Image: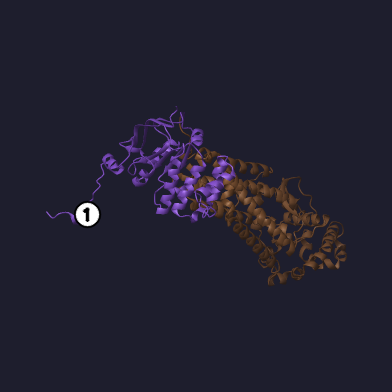
Amino acid sequence: MFLLEWLQHKHSTILFTVIGLLLVGAIGYYEYSLYQQTQVADETAAEWYPGMLALVKKTRDKKALYKKFPDVLLAVKEQHALATHNAAAEQKAVTPSFVDFTHYFSPIIRGQHAEQLGFVAGEVQATRHELMYLQKNHITAMFPIAFLANPKTAESVNPPLALAPIIPIMTTSYYENGWYQVWDWFRTGGIIFGLITINLAFGTGVAEELQNGAQRLRFLRLHQVNWWRLVTTRWLSLIAIPIVSLVAATGLFLGYSLMRTGLGDLRYPVQHWITGPPWDTLFNDVRLREAMNYFAPLRIELMPLSQYLLLAGALLLAIICLNAAIILLVSRIVKQPLVTQVLSALWPFLIFLPINAHNPFSYLNIDTSATNYIATVVDTTQTLYWPILGSIFLAALLILGVVILWRPAVAKGVRK
Amino acid sequence: MTDILTIQDLIFGYRHTPVYENATLTLDHPGIYGLVGPNGSGKTTLLNLITGLQHPQHGTITIAGQPNRDAVVFEHVAYVQDSRVLYPSMTGLDHLRFVAHQRRRPAADIDRFIQNLQLTTFVHRAVRTYSLGQKQRLLIALGLLDNTPILLLDEPLNGLDPDSTMAVRSILTALSKTQRTVIVSSHNLDELTKVTTEIIFVVDHQLQLEHLTKDVEARYTALYHQQTTITLPDEEAPS
């Protein structure tokens, strides 16, 4: 049966077309992101943060910017030391190269004016934590450094009117390297759009065998390909095709990004929510301390991007398995290739429904589950990643089981 | 000697429409058998029942003395169905490769079939580009590649141009000289009589095997009470 799958696809140019489309989409999104990076400062921002604007403009000269970052990060450390031990001597210790940076971050790193900006101390702490991590591991930060505002804060942030235009600028990251773009695909759900494209091209399931009175199914059965073999082989094929397409497109994209801006650093810090002791605060303020531990007993920790990509990749694999089973079920019901393709392309949109505790598709949001942010949504202190991963695989197998057991009449053996 | 095919007390019907009622048939020697009956009489249903694609409500079907389980059917029967079984995106060669793989036949056999059945000119093209005649020849090639003692052909002559009709006839003539048992369902009585004298009529929900040497059409008319001369309304004599 694997031979038949191979023979069906070997002459097809659709696979190459799909890979090409995915690549074009990825490069387009990437270039758009890089373009936006250079456009982050508008006039309002310039009014309030001339230092920031100056720094933003320098993104057009990447080499200079990256060269500058080691100093910036060193200055963060110095700033931290000053903030905790000798606030009075702070201004004297600021290095010249840090001037622009402090315009933007210094008050926040010290815990000052956080409320004025509309952020809570949790974001201040997370951002500071990230900066320390970058410095410790000698990793170049994405530019401009953004506040790590989680979705809950982003929704609730209520800055003074005059500051409102600055908030999106301060919280938006531009994933400027190859691996960071892949991260962004998981974060924004772009990878799901890839799956939708693949489903549109290949999502016929077993509809071709079942249409026209299941003639092909009869032919296959007479050649010792029973329903079980057909369904399981097609399921594996529907898993293999997205993997091949996505891996090929990603590989080509990474090659492109390597030449364009580089791949980035797989040690880059990614936020995730795990149970841990409350943060010790640098700030002698009860309200800020409470705000910093908003998710307690969960707290925001950092993991390397490589680990995040592995976790997200495994979730994607599980979703691909589920997707393949859903396509088979849809094709078993509608028995029409075209209708099956359209429905197969529509179902992944459910993943984009608002994330909440009552929406089961929230668990299919790869970023939310890989970072365990889902735990804050369903109000638990557990790490839900493995149960979610297992449940998706189980759901895929259950649906596959239903399709296998739901044999068409022509697929059943002779009753003797 | 074991009978090649035995159908015993076969009962089958669709809801309120009986197709076979205690039908019986025995084929005890190889050869070409025509399967004849009006539209909807149950010719395709019979082939489906023999191959186990449909199940009798009563009765038994045995092939070489064994009930027609999937494994027995696979071992003994090749069934050439209509062209909808073919995958449009695959080439004829792909289909031959698949069948050869399932039958564990060497790749060299495929080349021999392509040559002998004159498929060379189109076998490398996707099936979606084939004419009906080319599809039919490919289907018969697939059936022959199965290399089973029994070959069932469902309406292989339907819609064929003269060239393809002659090609299929030539294949059937060659088959009649082998030790295979071939059942050919068809409405084309002229063509059938060119390759066989043994006809299975589906009549009154029964199977009736007859050896006919001449005038099959007359026999057909007698069995199915068909009016052979039709008078056009305009030509009726004025009253």
User: Quadrant location of the N terminus of chain B?
Assistant: top left
Q: How would you rate the neighbour count of disc 1 (Cα within 10 Å): few for under 14, some for 14-19, many for 20 or more?
A: few
Q: Is residue A154 visible?
A: yes
Tell me: residue B3, above or below residue A392. Answer: above
Question: Which percent across, then down, holds residue A326?
Answer: 55, 46
Q: Is residue A378 left or right of residue B76?
A: right
Residue A225 vs residue A78, the one in the foreground: A225
Which of the chains is purple? B
Q: Which residue is mark 1?
A: B232
Q: Is residue B29 left or right of residue A357?
A: left
Q: Is residue A359 visible?
A: no
Identify the coloring.
by chain
- Name the quadrant containing residue B108: top right
Q: What chain is tagged by disc 1?
A: B
Question: Which percent across, then down, holds residue A61?
Answer: 77, 70
Residue B199 vs residue A310, the one in the foreground: B199
Question: Which percent across, then down, holds residue A290?
Answer: 73, 51
Amino acid type of the residue that numbered disc 1 sits on in the rendered structure: Leu
Tell me: residue B111, above or below residue A171. Answer: above
Q: Is residue A275 left or right of residue A390?
A: right
Which residue is farthest left? B239
Question: Which percent across, then down, holds residue B72?
Answer: 50, 33
* Residue at screen point 21% across, 52% down: B231
Which of the chains is brown? A
User: Quadrant location of the C terminus of chain B?
Assistant: bottom left
SS for callout 1 = loop
Residue B189 vs residue A154, the one in the foreground: B189
Residue B118 vs residue A115, the one in the foreground: B118
- Number of callouts: 1
